[in-house]
Image: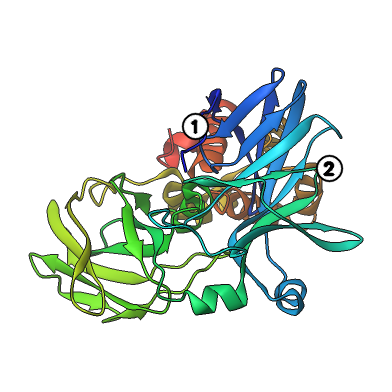
Amino acid sequence: MTAISYRQDFTPKVLTESANISYRFSCPGPGVFRCTLTGLVFGTVQEAELQYRTVQWDERLLQPAGKAAAGPLFNIHSPDGAVSQLHLPHCEIMDAPLPEGLLSVVHITDDGMSILEPLEITDTHVVVNVPHFSRLGLVWDVVRRFINITRPIRGQVLLFLRAPHRDKRILDVLLLQDNIPLSEVAPQQEPAENIKISSQCILSVGHSYSVHSEPEASIIQPEDSTFDPHYGPNFFPTFEVFLPANQEEVTLMVQNQERTPVWNRVVQLTGPRSENVFLPAEKLLLARTQFASRVSEPNLDQLLGKLLGLGVINDGEMESVRTGTRVDKARKVIDMVRRKGNDASSCLIVALCEVDPNLSTQLKLS
């Protein structure tokens, strides 16, 4: 089968509220539009405002139907009738015909769950008609997947480099299915930085994998790990590779249980900076105590107003901060913002430089 011919790729606006990430895009009219972050493809019949995010699967719904998650579950909103088709990215390898019935799409509403049979399965996507939106996600048939357990899938190796600590730094290695968006994984790894590198590999469910490095790392833990599909909501490193703080390059290899390499790359360790340079979220953490003791009540109120206007916090979060002493409120503000990542932390730093330039200088945030 041939891959879909896309009319237009788009990069959506990414919105962050608390720990939740959502996406928004205005389709200008009829056509086929592919999201570059999630891989979702929307077939529209008219202009439409799309809003979508990933949500957690409920295994209690899937198990009685004999289904298992085969991709993220998306909660999608758009005007009824504006989108006629949805194409969900799969991770199957299409060098041989797929077993019939292996993949389908579930549609979950307040009334329950229904199964949508594919109109087409391309090299990259499962295509379904959508009468209206709610929660939709790709699923495997459990029995057919078990029968075809040896069938490999497309995977990805994601690397995140932590900042140096003393004489060491840690390279986190995540083995995931390739239809998990990087945009969902990266914010959870902050302040570690994603190393952009070709990530594609072939993985087999239930097989054991190990990581090796040259020069040899001081520690790689665990020694091996079994790969099982996982679709969040939390993504943790599969392996941790401990390296010297001054090492600039490493050859990294992922091997299967037969000790055959499935992924091998030269990795430039140019992510986190020297020990005296920090990411915005790290800067806020270092300045937290002094910020809480020195920021004035009026300036704190101004900061809250600016953060609300920028969309860094919402009305509910703003109200929750307003309780307690000045010091308590200052701690709540800085903790709330830094937990949202570096973009949000940068907004707070810029706002503080505008509201109280003297304090921002004293805290080394200017």
Q: Is residue 88 visible?
A: yes
Q: Quadrant of residue 111?
A: bottom right
Whole-percent x, y for residue 259 in the image: 18, 76
Tell me the residue at 77%/72% (across/down).
61
Q: Position of residue 133 (x, y in %)?
A: 80, 44
Give the amino acid type for the residue marked by disc 1 in the picture. Asn
Above or below, 132 relative to 56:
above
Disc 2 marks a residue whose amino acid type is His
Element on which disc 1 rests: helix
The kind of secondary structure element at disc 2 is loop
Q: Is residue 161 left or right of residue 214?
A: right
Horizontal arrangement in the rendering, residue 76 relative to residue 33 (left or right)? right
Any part of residue 162 in sight: no
Graded by Cα atoms within 10 Å as few (under 14), some (14 to 19) or many (20 or more), the crowding at tag 2 reads: some
Residue found at x 41% / y 57%: 96
Residue with the mark numbered 1: 358
Q: Which residue is mark 2?
A: 132
